[in-house]
Image (spheres, grey):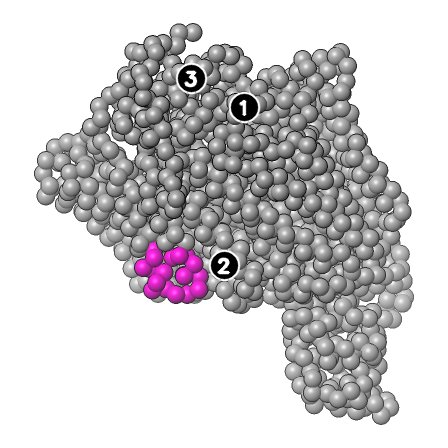
Amino acid sequence: MELPNPAPRPEGEVRELERIWATPRGWRLLTAVNNTVIGLLYIGVAFLFFLMAGVLAMLMRTQLAVGDNRLIGQDLYNQMFTVHGTTMMFLFAVPAVEALGVMLLPQMLAARDLPFPRLSAFAIWAYVVGGLVFFSTIFYDLAPKGGWFMYPPLTLTEYSPGDNADFWLLGIGFIEISAIAGAIEIVVGTLRTRPPGMSLAKMPIFAWTMLIFASMIMFAFPAVILATMMLEIERAFGWPFFSAARGGDPLLWQHLFWFFGHPEVYIIFLPAAGLVSMIVPTMARTPLVGYHLIVVALIGTGFFSFGLWVHHMFTTGIPAMSLAFFSAASMAVAVPSGIQVFAWIATIAAGRQRFRMTTASLFVLGFLFIFTVGGLTGVMVAMVPFDYQVHDTYFVVAHFHYVLIGGFVFPLFAAYYYWIPLFSRRPLSERLGRWVFWLMFIGFNITFLPMHLTGLKGMPRRVWTYPEDIGWNMLNAISTVGTYVLAAGILIFLIDLIAKFRFGNAEIENPWGAGTLEWLPNDVYSTRSIPHITGREPLWDRPSLPQEVRDGHHYLPNAPTGGRETIVTSPIHAQPQYVIQMPGPGWPPFLAAVFTAACFLLLTVKMVTIAIICGALAIAFVLVWAWGLDPGPSKGTIDIARGIRLPTYMTGPTSHSWWAMVVLMIVAASLYFAYVFSYLFLWLVSPEVWAPTGSPAPPPGLWPVSAAALMLAGSSTIWLISRRLEKLAASPVAMAAALLLSLALLIGALALELSGHLMTGLRPGDNAYGAMVYLGAVLFAQLAFALTILGLFTLARYLTGKLDGARRVTFDNYMLLYHYAVAQSLLGLALVHGFPRLIG
Amino acid sequence: MSLARSVAAFLLLLALQGCSGVQSALDPSGTEAERIDTLTWLLIVFSTTVFLAVGLITAAALRGGGRWRARLANERLVIGGGVVFPIVALTLLLGYGFYLMGPGSPAAARADGQLRIEVVGERWWWRVTYVDETGRRVESANEIRLPVGRPVQVELTSADVIHSFWIPRLAGKLDMIPGRTNRLTLQVAEAGISRGQCAEYCGGPHAFMSFFAIAMPEDQFTAWLDREAGDARNPSGEDQVAGQALFLSSGCVACHRVRGTEAQGTIGPDLTHVGSRHSLAAATLENDPDAFVRWIRDGQHVKPENLMPPYEIFTDGELRQLAAYLDQLR
């Protein structure tokens, strides 16, 4: 292969890169946005949550050690298991996966950073502040106590007065924000910032799993976002989505929650499987067997996981046909998991030398055994009659801890041991690592293996104590002992980590002799030059690659625009397309995150005025940060290699900004799909006519038709502006008038829709029908609000000369979201006005 | 290998502990539970076999000789172990599962037996109403009595939050959801006592929402139901009479009903025959005069957050009289 940049590089390029990518020092560290720095913060905080929720688990096990124990009171215990579950799922597992993505993806893809560094920083800070506040509620007797699944009606104000449940909704709110932000980052990152030549078929499995992870978040999280919105609205304003007495249905929550909650398990597990697929080939010193099968299996799991949610609801009394379907689907998911397990075993067997037994290997093997057990008990609970017995018992507790600790925590520890040389000057101790592994492995099995039997012997979950004379004492005592053994292992890990961890790169490059790009010579700017990729294990294929990369013989060995940048490539074949200019450190993301957190927090404790001020400040800082983006084509084109000249600015469907907006639109569409589902679901369960007797008929057809006409006029306006941006840009009055007109038309349509329903006398608190009608308007208003800010922002850019025919990314974003909002709202009008007429 | 040891320990434990227990799914006494018990053992054997096979294959990949490892190191293993085997094995299992789910499955239940029991989940107790073949409704609470050998339909609803009705020895669980009615058929094979418990977290003292299910031979059951349908016994003896007076004058009647007296409250459990039940406070306490005393005085300690307000107004003597009255309501 001919090197992209064969000539020797001029002096001073590396120093320039170091200066540009330097990590801010002192208290300015808070402004850092580089993936290695914030990624480390991310994973560190996620691990802190793991430890704290783990301490709660130990306290709960201590309470359950003997029957009729009164060590921890009932109320505190109920708070503890709620916080334990919520923290482990939302504040540890999902963020830890995203943190691994933020830390490892750019290195694995030899990109300088992810495409939206400030977005990552914002998401992480919002999570850190919000997460810590949420967890601390356990110390003030303010923690939620409705279980991590928060089933209404138990969590409605009537049965859960006080702010406790609202704190749960608050905590989840932050995770929703950071998960969606992370998903945008990761989808665009994996699809557009791969090194030249790394086609999808050469992408490391971990990157595949992160891509699928992010796609699943796009479809799964909106369901829970809608559900939490509805629950909070019902708690605060009494719109009856879940109250059976007024036409709501508690099962609606369960459908939405598990439509999110089941994929959530795979959202956690798939990236962990991706970690294993990276470690196994290295330790076996041979390429992964069945790469293509694994990719197919991963995509299959992603799809299947959306068809399984009802298996969490087998005992709710749903019809036998659905039971059969979801039972079969739940079993089918064993196939992709089986493919992966056997691919790893085949890879272990394929190595010419025997599998190398490092601590990481031990954790991988431990994972393999535990996860297999969890998978098999998963097959058991997928059998509906068996599930009738063990559902909501300790059998299920055992099952999902085998799946989640086995399927996620063990691979995570393997990852800690495996990748720590990238982040710490000294690695973790392999000798202590043996202790850590065996204590964790044995402790885990002592804790959770007996629980299968405890459950079969009739012990339900979520009980804070149990009668002494019922035959559960011994089993519970054993489980409690196991917890302490497990904790001892984690404690040794922690001590070793504190003793060894020093931020920086280890002296030994590539200590395990791995084949993937993250083991190239690394510094704050990632790799010196971005390699050309021809195979799946570039470092094995081409042993001279590290030296070539270090000497700057590959792409973009310097910083030609004088700022942070990386190469954007085409999504499938990874052909270089343009160079993206990325923002560096700054206060706005941090401050925006802090004020976002403050806003939600103050809303929760009902300090509305200050909350609104904080919300406005958060938006202001986001705008300050966005003001510096969209740099325009002023830097012209640059050479990234001999004979390859790329633009430094891109608009339209090729640009990363367009892609991010499309991801955001998919998220919004998923949210709306969840709304349509909820609307139809409540119609389906409503025993009477729709709209229910006593509710007024929908407003006359003229209302929705006028609203639709306004929106279509708005879309046409946007279309005209887009076509004539060049000409319009020369005429400030026309441009300003056109932009403002588009906003006025949209807001007018919203006003028409709202006043139409208000005029008929329908109120959202009347019944589920009214609540759904007004919820549709709320979702419309949400978009109108975002568009108003974005539209005025676009106008401001234009008036200050930062927007014209060529420099139009800001306008394009406004345009995309506008068209989306119109499409969604037209569908909404058809549903809300058309459906009752259709069936009435 | 420590896992093998753990598995062995697990099996040993199983043998030592036995499967008996008043709330154990492994000690079935009803048709439905027996059917699931068979399935359970089938699944345990299946899972153990697959687990051991995967373990052996992994051991061969790790430590086996060159020939063994070469044989494993290709996509045939992935296709065979990951695709073919699960599809075949799981199809068979699923078929068996459908066969089991067919007739008599809880969700599809529509019993021919004329006796019906309506159970309403309340925070945190069970309202139980027997509806016999003549349409006679008999109110009771916190206990289920069943005739041996004939199917009984249980109708499950909730008065507040979601609960779940579960008697592991008799059948699987079924949720009690506001706004919905779920039906379950119970058929008991032999006379005896089983324990049931709420299986859906319902807040506060969810751990103390249990009950006993007592299976009786047909003739005894009929006799019992007739007695249960009757009014409360009149107190005899000084303590009992004084106790009744206290009961009727201290606010108890606002929530509780004792048929045949002016106590006609319906918020709390019906107490007409409370003395004859197997337990108190939804299987939180045994049923004896001392337990009545503890419950009335220390209810919030015995079962925190339960909805009966604490009654600290009574002297020890009055409590004894109240207990004597309630205890004789058999």
Boundaries of the magenta span: A598-615
| Residue A244 in picture, x, y percent from top left | 54, 61
Foreground tag (2 vs 3): 3
Say if the magenta span includes residue A609.
Answer: yes
Q: Nearer the viewer, residue A323 or A703?
A: A323
- Mark 2 lies on residue: A167
Whichever of callouts 3 and 1 sits on the residue coming sooner in the sequence is: 1
The answer to whether residue A609 is above or below residue A295 is below
Quadrant that contains the C terminus of chain B? bottom right
Q: Residue at x 45, y 34 (%)?
A: A36
The picture places residue B310, in percent across and down from the top left corner, at: 67, 79
Chain letter for mark 3: A
Residue B208 belongs to the span the image colors magenta: no
Q: Tag 1, which secondary structure?
A: loop
Inspect the image, locate mark 1, and give the three-letter code of the amino acid beneath it. Ile
Evaluate whether residue A374 shows in this view. no
Q: Which sits in the foreground, A240 or A478? A: A478
Q: Are marks 2 and 3 in contact (CB under 8 Å)?
A: no
Assign a secondary structure to mark 2: helix
Q: Nearer the viewer, residue A428 or B286?
A: A428
Q: Which residue is mark 3?
A: A549
**Residue indicated by mark 1:** A508
**Residue A63 found in image quarter:** bottom right
